[in-house]
Image (cartoon, rainbow, N blue to C red):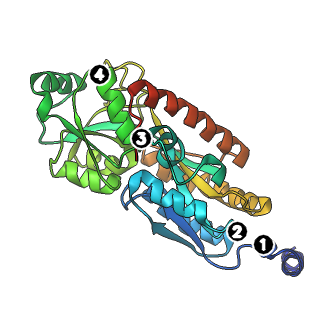
Amino acid sequence: MLHSHRWLAAGAMAFALAGPAHAAWPERPITLIIPAAPGGTTDIAARLIADKLGAKLGQQVIVENRAGAAGIIGAQTLARAKPDGYTLLMGNIGPNAINYALYKTLPYKPADFAPVTLVISVPNVLVVNEASPVRSVADLQAQSRRDPSKVSFGSSGAGQSPHLSGELFKQRAGVAGTHIPYKGAGPAVAALLGQQFTFMIDNLPSSMPYIQSGKLRALAVTSERRLAELPDVPTMAEAGVKDMVVTAWFGLIAPAGTPEDVVGKLYAATRDVVQSPDISDRFKAMGGRAGGNTPAEFTAFINQERTRWKQIVDAAGLAQEQ
C-alpha cells in the first residue's frame, strides 16, 4: 500500500510539474501576515497553527507581524500581494468587517480578498487591574458616575473588537470612558497590568493567563452563556448589560484571484489542523472555539459581519475620517 502511495505521489508530482505553475503549490515557504503586534489572539492563534500547517503543506509557514493602523497595514499588504498562495493573512473582525464601516476610505475592499476558513472564534472579557477597587460592572458604573473624567479604556487598536466592544459597553452600561488605542492586545494588556487605564474589553485569549494568575480581574464575558473556563464570571446580561453579545473571530484569508485549487488545499490543511484534538483543546483552554468552515461559508459569514458592524458603528456615530 505504501509503495502504491509513493508511486501515486510521484506521479502526481510529475503531473503537477507539467501543469500550470501553481499546480505544484507550495514549492517554497508561505508568509502568514498578522495585522497586529505579538501577544494578541491574532498572533497567538497564527503561531499555534503555523508549524502544523507547514507540516501538512510540506513547506514552512513564516509568521510576520505587520501591526498598526487598526489592521489596515497588514490587510493592505495582503491586498497588494501576488495571488499565488504564498502570502496569506490572519484576518479578523477588525480589518475585515468593522473597518469598512469605521473608516470613510480604506486602501482595500472586500473584493480584494479570498476567505479560506475560520480559525478561531472567541468571546471578549471585561477586565480591570487586580489593584482596582472595581469588583463588578455595577462598581464600574458607580465609579463612572462619580468621576467620568477619570475613567478610560484601552484596546488593541481603533476598529478592533475590543475598541468597538468598549464603545458598545459605554452605550449599553451608561459608562463614560476615554479610548486609548494600542498597536495590539499585547501592548494593551501590558498597559493595563501597569494601571495605565481603567478597564478593557479584551479578546479572551490575551487576558486569560493574567486572569488565571490573578493579575487581572474579570468582571463579565460577552458570550451568551458563562464559560466553563471562567465559571464564576457572569455574562454581560447577568451583570445587567443587555444586548452586549460580541464574538471576535480570526481566520485565514488569501488575496482575490488565488487559484481555486490552492485555496482548496489551504482550506483542507487548515481545517484538519484547527480541528485536531491538540489545537482544538488549546483553543478551548484559551476560551475559544476552533473553526474550519468552507471558503464559501467563511465568505458568507464575513459578509454578514460587515453588515452587522455597520449597523452598530452607524448607530453609535463612530465613523471617522482616516
Residue drawn at point x = 29 percent, y = 22 percent: 173
Q: Are marks 4 and 3 in contact (CB under 8 Å)?
A: no
Whole-Å distance between the Cαs marked 4 and 3?
17 Å
- Label 2: which secondary element: loop
Whole-Å distance between the Cαs marked 2 and 3?
30 Å
Residue drawn at point x = 54 percent, y = 30 percent: 308
Compared with residue 230, is residue 240 higher up or lower down, i.e. above or below?
above
Q: Which quarter shows the N terminus?
A: bottom right
- Three-letter code, disc 4: Ala
Q: Which residue is mark 2?
A: 84
Q: Earlier in the sequence, mark 4 or mark 3?
A: 3
Residue drawn at point x = 14 percent, y = 28 percent: 148
Judged by depth in the image, the label closer to the viewer, 2 or 4, is 2
Question: Which mark, residue 161?
Answer: 3
Compared with residue 200, is residue 188 higher up or lower down, i.e. above or below?
below
Compared with residue 298, is residue 259 higher up or lower down, i.e. above or below?
below
- Three-letter code, disc 2: Asp
Whole-Å distance between the Cαs marked 3 and 1?
36 Å
Tell me where residue 181 appears, x and y as whole percent: 29, 48
Q: Which residue is mark 4?
A: 173
Tell me where residue 134 appears, x and y as whole percent: 15, 31
Question: Which mark, residue 22?
Answer: 1
- Label 1: which secondary element: helix
